[in-house]
Amino acid sequence: MSTSMLIIIIVVAVLVVLAITALMGMLARRRHLRNRFGPEYERAVDEEGGKLAAERDLRAREERHDQLDIKELSPERRSEYAQEWSGVQEHFVDRPDGAVSEADALVSRLMGERGYPTEGYQGAVRDLSVEHGRTLEHYRAAHDVKVRSGNGQATTEELRGAMVHYRALFEDLLTDQRSR
C-alpha cells in the first residue's frame, strides 16, 4: 500500500470520526432541549419552521434566562402567596371575571418577585419557558381567556378553566425549580 493511499485512508477515517462526533453532539443538545423545554420544544419547532431554527431560539432563551437573577422564595413568602391565592379563588364565586384578572396579577407579581421580567406577555412566556415549559400551556390558555373576558367574550366555565390554568403555573412558580 502506498503512502498516499495510507494518508487518504487516515484522512477519511478522521473525517468520519469528526462527523460522528458532531452528529452525537447535535443529538445530545437536541435531547437536552427536548428535556428542558418539554412541550415548548415542539411548539418552537412549529413556530420557527424547523428544528434548527427552533433550537437556535431555545438556546437564546437559555442564554437570556442565565442572565436573570431568579430567586427562591422564603417559606414565609410562599405561605403569604398561597393565602393570597386562596383569597382570589374565593372571589371567583361572586366575580369570576374579576378573579381571573386578580389571578393574572398575582401570577405576574410572583414572577416579578422570583426575578422574571414582567414587561409583557410574550417576553414572560419566553423567559418562563426555560424552567416552566411544562406548565406554559396553562399560562397561554389562562391568558387567552383573560383577554377574551376583558372583551366580555368568556363564559363562566371558561373563566373557571382559566383559574385552574393559572393555579398550575402559580404552584409551579411558588416552588423552586432548582431544588427538585
Image (cartoon, rainbow, N blue to C red):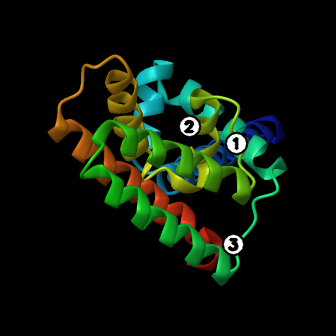
For mark 2, give the secondary structure. helix
Residue 126 picture location, percent across and down: 60, 36
Q: Residue at x 26, y 39 (%)?
A: 159
Specify whether 10 is left or right of 126. right
The residue that disc 3 covers is: 73
The residue that disc 1 covers is: 9
Residue 102 picture location, percent across and down: 47, 45
Q: Residue at x 78, y 40 (%)?
A: 2
Q: N-terminal of the two: label 1 or label 2?
A: 1
Q: Residue at x 38, y 23 (%)?
A: 150
The residue that disc 2 covers is: 125
Q: Is residue 31 something one can see in this rendering? A: yes
Residue 179 picture location, percent across and down: 62, 79
Say if 92 sits above or below 84 in the image.
above
Q: CA distance from mark 2 to mark 3?
A: 20 Å
Q: Quadrant of the C terminus?
A: bottom right
Amino acid type for the residue under numbered disc 1: Ile
Q: CA distance from mark 1 to mark 3?
A: 60 Å
Q: N-terminal of the two: label 1 or label 3?
A: 1
Q: Mark 1 or mark 3: which is in front?
A: 3
